[in-house]
Image: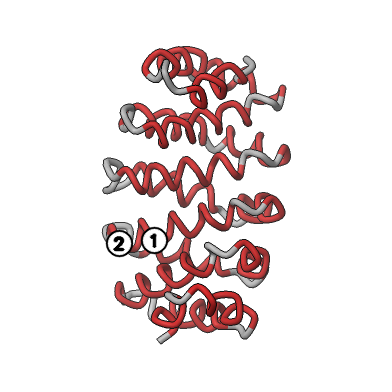
Amino acid sequence: MLLSLSVCPDNCVPLVRDGAHVALKAAARNHRSDEVVAWSACVTLRTMSLHYENTAALVRDGAHTAVITAAQDHSGSLRVVRAATIALRNLALAPGNAVPLVIGGAHTAVMAAMRGYFSGDMEVAWAACSALRFLSFAADNAVPLVRDRAHTAVMAAARAHIDEVLVVRAACGTLANLSRTADCRAGLARDGVGKFVVFASERHRADATVKDYCRRVVL
């Protein structure tokens, strides 16, 4: 029912205002082993999170934890993993959510998604790298992201999808953001970020966005 209602854009903000996301979280928790319930909850939360005005409430009320748990419990289901990763990407777009999401483990969830069974899926790679890019805008997140090796995850995803410019852009944007924090630069350099940005820039030499992000990387 909630999935059907959320398809209509005009319904999404009122649904969150009335607590539909809380009911989804409870359903997902109470039926953790049911892949259909997990998929339905993740798709509905993905749709709700497309509306920027919903993002703060969704994270405040822990919707991201339901999505993360569903992706972990059903890591072999592409439709669950894809919907969960895109939902986390949407939630990460709101600057105020960045730190709470990293504290809640959203970064490790999207990293696991793009390293798991579906590492070859472009949508998963794009959503995961985009989520990490948005999370890395928050300066307080830089050190924990590098500590948990977000930089190596985005480089691996970009190499695996090197001809997909959206994935490469998101990966390079993440690296540029992380490199703004001086305490991260030694680790980034040690793990080959310098060589990677040269490679990415050369491979996409006609793309101004990729080249701009690569120029911004400071090591």
- Marks 2 and 1, how far apart in space? 6 Å
**Amino acid type, callout 2:** Arg
Return the residue at label 1.
Answer: 83
Q: Is residue 55 above or below residue 115?
A: below
Which residue corresponds to mark 2? 79
Instruction: Count the numbered circles shown.
Output: 2
Label 2 secondary element: helix
Three-letter residue code for mark 1:
Ala
Residue 77 occupies which quadrant of the picture? Answer: bottom left
Q: The residue tagged with tag 1: helix, strand or loop?
A: helix
Q: Could you say where residue 177 lies in the image, as x and y percent from the top left?
A: 63, 31
Q: Is residue 31 left or right of residue 131?
A: left
Labelled pair 2, 1 in contact (Cβ < 8 Å): yes
Near mark 2 (Cα within 10 A), the count class, few <14, some 14-19 or many ≥20, is: some
Q: Quadrant of residue 183?
A: top right
Residue for point 47% across, 67% down: 47
- Which residue sits at x=42%, y=68%? 42
Residue 96, placed above or below residue 165: below
Q: Residues within 10 Å of mark 1 (few under 14, many from 20)?
A: many
Q: Quadrant of the N terminus?
A: bottom left
When the figure is inspected, residue 17 is found, relative to residue 134, above or below; the finding is: below
* Residue at left offset 65%, top offset 35%: 142
**Does residue 18 sit above or below 195 in this rendering?**
below
